Image: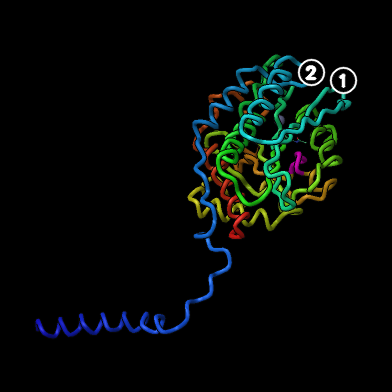
Amino acid sequence: MHRLLILLLLLSIAACRNDSAPLAENPAPAAPPATPRDAKPVPKFDRDSAYAYVEQQVNFGPRVVNTDAHRQTREWLIEKLKAFGAEVIEQDFEARAFDGTNLRSTNIIARYAPELEDRILLAAHWDTRPFADSDLEDDPNAIVNGADDGASGVGVLLEVARQLGLNTPDIGVDIILLDAEDYGKPSNTNSYALGAQYYAKNVPAPKPRFGILLDMVGARDATFLVEGYSEQYAKDVVRKVWQLGDQMGYGNYYVNARGGTITDDHYFINTIAGIPTIDIINLQQEGGHSFPTHWHTGDDNMDVIDKRTLRAVGQVVLAVVFREAAGTL
Ligand code: AHN
Ligand code: ZN
């Protein structure tokens, strides 16, 4: 019995050897195309750092265009991005709001490896809504702090920028902090995203090949359903990002179901600039209300922000950049 076991063991070792034996006699196999082994590793996204960047924006006060808080935040964002090693373009413009107000606005463009032709666009809006006009808000004087609606996407991108300053992918990245997104009136979708409309008509060359917009990416229990224009204009990007999110263990956020169609910044980047751009945006399946309940209410403050959500977004964005650079996305 003992001998039989030894014989079986020897046979199985021989079998294993058999598989690998011919390799030694053959010439070395050609190097595979771009393997993850050759690629630069994806840096670790620091969720505490991202959270602090969200909080610092909120501490300035609501970033409503033409206010002091808006001007102070503008200076702070530019200073941070420069400190993180980006080349910063201040894209100043004036836009007429639906109510006639002249909006003195700035898109802040942070460029990494500006000499590279092959580029990825990452965007979020940094202004906040001047009025809490959600149906779910009873208080007509409520103030929108925009912790989620605005600051979350910017906080994630600031941490991405910090990482890009420390680790250089072999691809260009343009981080665009868009202004005057949220001064619109619901009956006129073109009155929103004025910064994106300006950017889309004035894209600094070289033009990015594809883009990712982050909007309301910080709330606890956020779900990123597939937004309609993203699917229409950039379905390959949607598919890759949602698959990656799932592979990385964030499948509870990246839900593979169709959400609403939203006239957000990416709509104009798609239709005017022709850059296929997706929107990672918190769209809820439940309650018959597609946005989260704190949207455009006084409840959009730091209480709704969850570091785990910030990380689920930031870590996937970093993975997209470094994998795309390595040809493994
Ligand atoms: C419209 O309601 C037309 N667009 C919503 C885009 C938005 C507002 N995202 C955040 N706040
Ligand atoms: Zn909003």
Residue 254 percent across, percent down from the top left: 57, 48
Give the image's coloring scheme: rainbow
Q: Is residue 181 visible?
A: no
Name the disc covering residue 183, or none: none
- Work out which quarter of the rendered image holds the N terminus and state it: bottom left
The quarter holding residue 182 reads top right
Q: Identify which amino acid the numbered label 2 is placed on.
A: Asn
Q: In this view, does 172 lie above or below 80?
A: below
Name the disc covering residue 66, or none: 2
Residue 203 percent across, percent down from the top left: 82, 42
State yes or no: discs 2 and 1 in contact (Cβ < 8 Å).
yes
Q: Is residue 301 above or below residue 166?
A: above
Distance from label 2 to label 1 (Cα)?
9 Å
- Residue 178 forms part of the magenta stretch: no
Label 2 Cα neighbours within 10 Å, binned few <14 / some 14-19 / many ≥20: few
Q: Give the range drawn in magenta.
A: 262-266
From the viewer's perspective, tell me whether residue 39 is left or right of residue 72: left
Nearer mark to the viewer, of 2 and 1: 2
Residue at numbered disc 1: 101
Label 1 Cα neighbours within 10 Å, binned few <14 / some 14-19 / many ≥20: few
From the viewer's perspective, tell me whether residue 40 is left or right of residue 227: left
User: Measuring 80% from the left and 33% from the top, which residue is drawn there?
Assistant: 195
- Work out which quarter of the rendered image holds the C terminus and state it: bottom right
For disc 2, does the CB lie below 8 Å from ligand 2? Answer: no
Q: Identify which amino acid the numbered label 1 is placed on.
A: Thr
